[in-house]
Image (cartoon, grey):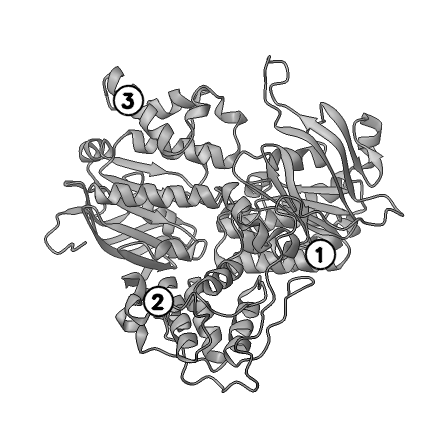
Amino acid sequence: MSFEQVPLSACLRHVTLDYGAGIVALDDVSLELKKGERLCVLGANGSGKSTLGSVICGLLAPDAGDVSIVGEHVCVDGTPNYEAYRSARQKLGLVFQNPDDQIVTSIVDEDVAFGPENLGVGADEISRRVTRELERVAMQDYAKADPTRLSGGQKQRVAIAGALAMEPEVLVLDEPGALLDVRGRRGIMRVMRELSETGVTVVHITHFMEEALEADRVAIMNHGKITLLGTPSEVFSHNDELESLGLEKPFATRLAERLRKRELNVPWTCSADVLQASIVQSFAHRGLVKQDSQTETAALPSTVAAETIAGAPQPQASTQGAAQPQASEQGAAQAQAQPKEQLQAAAIELQHVSYSYNRLESGHKRTINDISTRIEAGERVAIVGQTGSGKSTLVRLICSLELPDEGKVLINGIDNSHKRARRQLWGKVGYVMQHPERQLFAETVAEDVAYGPKNLGLAADEVERRCNEALELVGLAHRKDSSPFKLSGGQQRLAAIAGILAMAPNTIVLDEPMAGLDPQGRLQLRRILKSINASGVTVVQVTHSMESATHANHVIVLKDGSILMEGSPREVFSPANKALLRKTGLGIPKPLAWSLDLEEAGVPYLGKPLTTTELSDALKLSYAGSSVPSYEGEVG
């Protein structure tokens, strides 16, 4: 879309917003948004993204600068015009980072109707909008449900429906996909495309780099300033600057960089289609593409046809025409782990566990349905499943926050159904909730982290030692005397995790700990979890990221409250399970998905890689004419 002659939906001139205590959230920001434009805002935690979104949608007024929204001059020289704000807000929509901050009623359809009712929309029109938007976010079956009984992802979809029902001219979505499964994120991306095509201006704040590729423009924020602004290709070409800001590049860019380091002359690009076409074309020029799958040059983008891997080494021994290993078709829905020796009590064992939040209602549906599984001490487990599949409920049962209606939950061999037995488990299982920063309450970070160990009755010097070690581990030792409420969102999450670690649990259970963290924060947390797992702590993590799940050694896939499959990452994320996982609302890790796409286009067998390194190594070997290993064992 060309925006040259399109009117403005929002205009910010030299906007500054100071939260006090030396925290400048926005620092001399100027930005124009055209009607129907789709802007993606990226940046590290604490860079000012959410504050920028709040100014654009009229939730916050700046301390300095001018703001115009949907034709209303709402702020001039830092002085707000409250009448103009009231008028503008009728045309603005916002989806908060945390849906609990937005849901206000006890029935889903009434919550979606809340915004239009406050705008004075007629009853018939409200009913039409509510029906339309619940269907758009696939929540029509929950119209009469209590939002407090929904999963985090389901609440997020209700919040999005409520914002859409107001039919805003400008819509700001702050991390709308953080709590959603793969299918849910795809659905939100589709909704944003549809809204933009109808003239709605969409501001999308996210940490998912792939989502930014669909935007008209991308803004990178750092310390309250917009440091980069342009098309996705323009912005993602600034490799060094993005790396210095701790931001992740799109998968295609990362893979292209790795291939170039392996002396494969692929073009730099952030486009998956361009890179895949270039790889296939290069294999075709070498005569390595299977004849029945070879892609014709004319079908490829014109900019790709000449971009071959000319600099790659020559094959050492030709394997053309040799039979390649085929992906196993065994176990599409039965990726069960090999039997484990049961010489000692498992860290966690569930025996035919069922649970329902509405068990007193007739015809109720079980949230957890006849689950049996065993998690050995020292394992690292990833629990995945579509939104509403029962993941959060399952970990609450493991942590004894809920008790099963049927079956048994054994922790270190102890049945947690008995109150006396549960006392023996105090401090043995640590639970990091979906929004762990909400666990913070003390005046300083150190006091907050010390709360759990003190309640265990430990001596003062032991409490101090544990606190110091936990804060050192999460990288917050230098902030121990700070207020936890003065930390960034990512730092607050790490502080809450430190409080759990200071209790020295045998098992730590984390519900979506990566949600809302920037790439650097995710990498740091992944290292922390790897470190504590290496020390013998059992780690159980709920995640919507298939890439994060590959770092576990035991993956459990839930569907409708039951275990669909479980096993190692290589067993669960096998080509044979691709269709089933996608049907379940999930998917497979990008490296494996890419390898299957390339093989379908005629590239020789690439060995079922699960990491970017494995995929780039396989492409180099295959292009050189060498055989590619079928990757086995744990993911590196």
- Give the residue drawn at x 77%, y 53%: 378
Tell which of 68 and 70 is nearer to you: 70
In the displayed orientation, state which residue is furthest to the right.
343
Position of residue 555 relative to residue 622, above or below, is above
C-alpha gap between disc 1 and disc 3: 52 Å
The answer to whether 99 appears left or right of 201 in the picture is right
Q: Quadrant of residue 176?
A: top left
Check residue 274 in the rendering and tell me which mark sits there, or answer none: 2
Q: Nearer the viewer, mark 1 or mark 3?
A: 3
Name the residue beneath numbered marker 3: 128
- Provide the secondary structure element on which disc 2 rests: helix
Point out the tag, 1 or 3, that comes first from the N-terminus: 3
Is 467 on the left-hand or right-hand side of 208? right
The answer to whether residue 106 is visible is yes
Q: Position of residue 333 (x, y in %)?
A: 63, 43
Amino acid on which disc 1 is placed: Ile
* Residue 389 percent location from the top left of the image: 57, 35
- Residue drawn at point x = 31 percent, y = 67 percent: 300
